[in-house]
Image (tube, grey):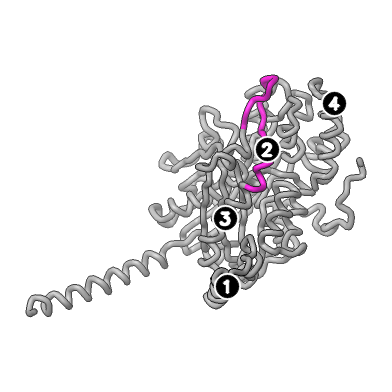
Amino acid sequence: MELFLVMLPLLLYYIIFSLFRLGYQKRDQCCYMIGYECYKASDDQILDPRSSAKVIQRNKNLGVEEYKFMLKTMVSSGIGEGTYGPKSIIDGKEESPTIVDEISEMDDIIFGTLDKLFAKTGVSPSEIDIVVSAVSLLSPAPSLTARVMNRYKMREDTKTFNLSGMGCSASVVAVDLVNQLFQTYKNSLAIVISTESMGPNWYSGKDKSMMLSNILFRIGGCSMLLTNNRKWKNKALLELTCSVRTHIGSHEEAYKSCFQIEDDLGKKGFRLNKDLPKAGARALNINLRILVPKVMPFSVMLRYYISHYGNKIMGRSIPKGAGPGLDLKAGIDHFCVHPGGRAIIDEVGQSLALSDYDLEPARMALYRFGNTSSGGLWYVLGYMEAKKRLKKGDTILMISLGAGFKCNNCVWKVMRDLDDKNVWQDCIDHYPPKDLSQHFL
């Protein structure tokens, strides 16, 4: 008993010290976005429907039915007439792209966005501590981050990471990776480069499920500057508050729903099969079960659980999806949905009970720039900012889906009113257009 009384103060001291240390570590963890820069190609790379039709015509493997399928799907895809294609495709090199073409495409996007990002933020490349590249379909040697190191003559102790095969959700994976690294490397500056190699991966066969990628995907990308140094807080645009990654690759249907493969003619491309919408809905549902309780008010979650389990006990049907029965807008102000295609945007909107206003940024990003893979989310964010929707204290839910199959979502807090027209500068005043149909029909 006496020994217990002697040890009790020490035990209480240990508990108090542990709680204090945990609270200090939690307070010290932060991830701010200082700036981001989306890529906009030159006018000579515009791939309007008529130009697209000419590219399709060059494919001698297509019959009349395949050609009609391509044109009809293109018109109904939700993509507008001003998107951009790779130079190699514009120049007719889709059958035989060279390494020079591949690297040149990446250099234009990566260096084009980084040059502007460094100029806008006033940060010198020599100050960067971490560089992460998120490009799924190109892994050259030396790596893309090595090219960045060489171009900007960065320090020898800069940490570099190259992510590949992550698909359209790669940028959120990269941001999450940086956030994890920030827990080890204090007061650091990090660059995330998110884009995709389009030209060398153009499909020139006739499999309809593989032809869809040519219709949806366009050239684009984004570079971001992140930090965990609290001295930058007043200059920050956003603060990362929550990030959840979900991977359902153990399920065979989901794993093969978006797959790089060769067709019967030996032509390489991406097969998007009928299981893709179901895989996306399943991954999103699992992800939100973890993420939503972290960001929603306690009272809202309590009412939802009472309603959910009340229906279960009473034998009533339980609404599917995260939207019905749960008001996501009680904890989230803006929804940054991956602009992967009209069907994907509509499916996410229906699952989460989102309005046309909520989905407008994703639809406009798809219409103006197409599916730019992992860079797409930042065009959606840019639209919100250009429309002056983002006010200090607002929360943004980013929803990304990608091959594997993965759903990677995160929540940002807006640090100040944002109104930069960014990559939307030349057209934002005309958006949303009254008519989204293509006149080429």
Q: Mark 1 points at which residue?
A: 314
Residue type for callout 2: Leu
Report the amino acid beneath label 3.
Asn
Task: Judge whether residue 268 is colored magenta.
Answer: yes
Name the front one of labels 3 and 2. 2
Start-end of magenta stretch: 260-278
Q: Are marks 3 and 4 in contact (CB under 8 Å)?
A: no
Residue at coordinates 52% horizontally, 37% vertically from top-left?
A: 145
User: Label 3 belongs to which residue?
Assistant: 409
Q: Looking at the image, which is closer to me, 17 or 251?
A: 251
Mark 1 / mark 3, whichever is N-terminal: 1
Decide: is 140 above or below 344: above
Q: Which mark is residue 272?
A: 2
Task: Residue 203 in the image: state x and y as whole percent.
Answer: 71, 28
Q: Distance between the residues labelled 1 and 2?
A: 40 Å
User: For residue 57, which numbered disc appears in the image?
Assistant: 4
Q: In the figure, is residue 215 to the left or right of 117?
A: right
